[in-house]
Image (spheres, helix red, strand yellow):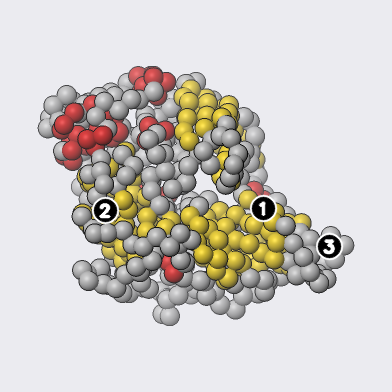
Amino acid sequence: MHRRYLLPAIALAQAAGSLAKTVNYDWNITWVIASPDGFTRPVIGINDAWPCPTIEANVGDVVTINVNNKLGNETTGLHFHGINQISTNNMDGAVGVNQCPLPPDYSVQYLFYAMIDPNNTNFAPPIPNSTVVNDGGDGHINVEPGKTYRLRLINWSAMFSTFVQFDSLDMDVIAIDASYVKKQSVQNLRISAAQRSDVLIAIPSDADRNFPYLVALDLNQDYADPDPPRPIQFPFNVTGQLVTDAGKATDGNLTVPRFEPYDDVTFAPHDDEAAYGPVTKRWLLNFNYCHDVNGYPRACFNDTTYIAQKVPALYSAASLGDNNTRTDAYGPIGAFVVEYGEVLEIVINNNNEAIHPFHLHGHQFQVLARPGSNAGNWSDGVEVNELPPRRDTVAVNPKSYAVFRIKADNPGVFLFHCHVEWHVELGLTATLLEAPDRLVNYTIPQDHLDACDALGIPTTGNAAGNADWDNTDGFVTVPPTVYTGSLYNETA
C-alpha cells in the first residue's frame, strides 16, 4: 500500500481512466496574524487563514481560481510554479511579464489545465533565524510498519536549500520537479529553493521504534568547499519523526556527520528520452553581481540587470504584430527569441562564489551538464549526459556552469531567473520569447486588462506603450532608487 504526504502546494495526481473535471477555488488574498516559527506577525494568507490551502487536481482537469485582492495596501499576483501553462501563457501570473499587478479590491480569474510536461550596499541577503517544516507543526508523520509511503518534499523557502535524511531508511526517488525518473535509492538529498522531490519510504515490517528525520537549512555559500571563507555550519534544523507507535519515544535525534547528497543531475528519465538535438540555437548567460548607474548593488546576466517595464512583455508580444520579434521593443528585460520547433540550448556560467538555483517558467528542461564547483566557464565540446533528467530548477555550483535544453513547443513569454527571491529583486532575470509569431493578437482576458486599467498601465505597444516598436520614449532604463515592493498607493 502507498500513502502520500505533501506540503501545501499544487498536488497533481495521475488519474488513468478518470474523467477530467473542473476544479474551482474562490480566494480572497488577505492579511492574517500568524506565528509559523513561534513569532507572531502579519503574513499573507487566503480567505483569512494561514497556512494557505492546497490546490488539488488530476492531470487533465481544468483549474479555475478566482482571486480577489483584499490586502488593502499591496498589489498582488499568483504564479503557479512548475505548471508550464501550455497554451495559457496569460495565466502564468508573473507580474510585469504575463499580467499587470492586481490592485486592492480587484479580482481576476486564473484558468488553466493541470498539466505537467537599495539600503544594502554589500549584496548581503537577509538571514533567517529559524526554519519551518509543515507550517510549524511538530513534524510527526504517522506511519505503519510494513507499508510504503510516498512523500512529496517541497522547498518553498525564499533563499536557502535544505538537506533531508530519514534516519537510516532509504528514500526511493521517483520524481524531481514533477518529472518522473527511474527509481533511485538515496540516503540524503539537497533540495534547493523551489525544487520538489517525490520519494518512497518503506517502513520495516518489524519496526519497533519511531524513526527521526532531519531537515537542515544550508546557509553556506558552498557546503562542499574544502577551504570555505567561513566555517561550514547548519544552525537551523528541524528533527521530525516517522511515528510507528505514539507510545514510544518521539524525542530521538538524527546526527549526520557529513552531508553527502545524491547528485540530482544523474537521475535517469523514466521514459528514456535522449538529449534533444540537433541544437539550433544557444542562449549563453553569464551571471555575476554588478552595480547600476547609481552605484546600487544589482545582479546581472551578461552585464545587464533586469529592469521591469510598464507594459507586460506578453502584452507587447500580442500587440506589436510582426515586430514582436524585435528584442529592443521590450526594454532591458534580457529578451531572447527562439522560434517554434527549435532546440534551444541554455548555458549559464555562474561566476559567483555561491551555489545558485536557476528556474525556467514554461518548461521542464533537460539537464545535460552541471559539474562541481570551480570547473570554470562552459566551452563548446564539454562532455554532456546523453540521457539527461528533466526538471525546472537546478542548483548551479560556484565558479562553474550548467547546460540545459528545451524544445520550443510552448509559445509564450517565460522568465528565466535565480530562485533566490532577493536576487530576483536585484535583477537576476532574463526573458524567453518563445515562438513570438504565434503570439500575435494573443487574447488577454478582460478581467486582467481591467486590473491594468485600474493602475493606469498600458496594455498594448512596446515596453512603454508606444505603438512604434522602436520608440523608446518612456522606457525604464534605470532601476528605481526607492524600493517599495508591491505596496499600493491609491493616490499614485
The answer to whether marks 1 and 3 mark residues whose Cβ atoms lie closer than 8 Å is no
**Amino acid at circle 1:** Arg
Residue shown at 43% from the left, 80% from the top = 226
Q: Which residue is mark 2?
A: 343
Element on which disc 3 rests: loop
Element on which disc 1 rests: strand
**Amino acid at circle 2:** Val
Question: Measured along the vertical axis of the image, is residue 381 above or below residue 313?
Answer: below
Query: Is residue 128 visible to us here?
Result: no
Camera-nearest label, 1 or 3: 1
Q: CA distance from mark 2 to mark 3?
A: 53 Å
Q: Residues within 10 Å of mark 1 (few under 14, many from 20)?
A: few
Q: Which residue is mark 1?
A: 4
Residue shown at 52% from the left, 32% from the top = 62
Question: Measured along the vertical axis of the image, is residue 2 above or below residue 233?
Answer: above
Question: Measured along the vertical axis of the image, is residue 359 above or below residue 55?
Answer: below
